[in-house]
Amino acid sequence: MGCNITDFNIIGQSSALLDALARGDRAAKSGARVLVTGETGTGKEMLARRIHAGGARAAKPFVALNGASLSPELMESELFGHVKGAFTTALRDHGGLVAQADGGTLFLDEIAEIAPALQAKLLRFIETGEYRRVGDAMLRRADVRLISATHRDLRGHDFRDDLYYRLAVVTIAMPPLRLRTDDIPLLAEYFLNRIAQHEKRNPMRPDDAALAALQRYSWPGNIRELHNMLYHAVVMNDGVVLTAQMLALPAPVDSMSLMRDAAKPQPLWVVEQAAIDAAIRYCGGNIPHAARLLEVSPSTLYRRPKTRAQA
Ligand SMILES: Nc1ncnc2c1ncn2[C@@H]1O[C@H](COP(=O)(O)OP(=O)(O)OP(=O)(O)O)[C@@H](O)[C@H]1O
Ligand SMILES: [Mg+2]
């Protein structure tokens, strides 16, 4: 995303955020398994890193597995490793993230995406501390703390109840940005300062109308979307005053023209492109995540021509 924001500087003063942080800090001291829930871009991974950093394993590795970015077959070997020849592309032995995280924390992002067969193996690993590399008969041991995250409810889907209860000893819900509009001025100032540093310019300041517009918007992509929008505004404009016009916020909806437009069929490629743009925006530019919401493979989006004229 151009400007990296990867420290544990979790900005905010809303009671919703402070509650989540306080729960995280308590959980950090206990070593219990934590499930962090919340919409995309709300800071689930940030909280997970903070829990790791605040606990007894802080000096050991924090290793992340993203369930959304891998096929089910690859995920098992990514997690537990594989031996040479376990499958056609397994050209040599591979240790896996569980081994890398030994003594530390393993962060299982988008846990809902883990296929049932792997859920069973993960449950076994939690219960026994033992696992096998793909294609290997040897039992290995690792001691990891699991922190998981999901943006959707795990229950009632393809997710095993027994695993759910194992993972969710403590649950922490990261509140969506639209429910903590108090945090928006602070976050905007923080991001505008960081962006200015990164771009070697004077920081921009939102005027009152811009701030009001930021606080009115619903932020489906949450904090990541806020950061992206501010970054875009800084790059595309000069000066130190950020106005509402500089923000790529959706125009207020004109319901008459919407009804008119809805009645007139659009070419399929227009509708498709609009759906793709909306999904990518919703995910703050996270293509694998957008692809999952659209139920297509990420490569479909990467391969996609921008407009039909270029096709
Ligand atoms: N309170 C905050 N203060 C500062 N930066 C934040 C805050 N919350 C989130 N961010 C930043 O916003 C981005 C999204 O956060 P993070 O990756 O933790 O979200 P997430 O919930 O894991 O998202 P996803 O579901 O898309 O994986 C990151 O770059 C993170 O550093
Ligand atoms: Mg995440």
Image (cartoon, helix red, strand yellow):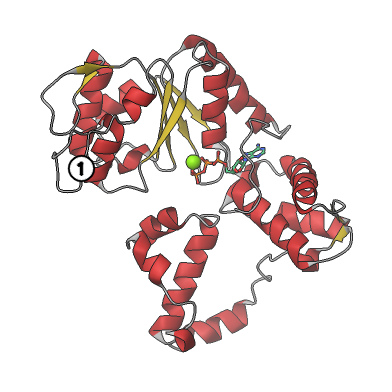
Relative height, residue 45 to residue 185 (above, below): above
Amino acid type assigned to the residue bearing label 1 in the image: Leu
Residue at image x 35%, y 63%?
299
Instruction: Mark 1: give few (<14), some (14-19) or many (20+) Cα within 10 Å.
Output: few
Q: How many marks?
A: 1
Residue at image x 44%, y 77%?
305
In the displayed orientation, state which residue is furthest to the front: 92
* Residue 284 in which image quadrant: bottom right
What is the secondary structure assignment of the residue under circle 1?
Answer: loop
Q: Position of residue 243 (x, y in %)?
A: 83, 63
Residue at image x 75%, y 49%?
198
Residue at image x 81%, y 59%?
210
Q: Quadrant of the C terminus?
A: bottom left
Relative height, residue 256 to residue 147 (above, below): below
**Residue sitting nearer the eye, 59 or 177:** 59
Q: Position of residue 21 (x, y in %)?
A: 61, 25
Relative placement, left or right, of 204 versus 252 is right
Relative placement, left or right, of 192 versus 274 is right
Q: Position of residue 218 (x, y in %)?
A: 63, 54
Disc 1 Cβ-to-ligand 2 distance below 8 Å: no
Relative placement, left or right, of 50 versus 180 is left
**Residue sitting nearer the eye, 267 or 235:** 235
**Residue sitting nearer the eye, 213 or 132:** 132
Relative height, residue 205 to residue 153 (above, below): below
Q: Write down the residue under mark 1.
A: 91
Q: Position of residue 280 (x, y in %)?
A: 50, 61
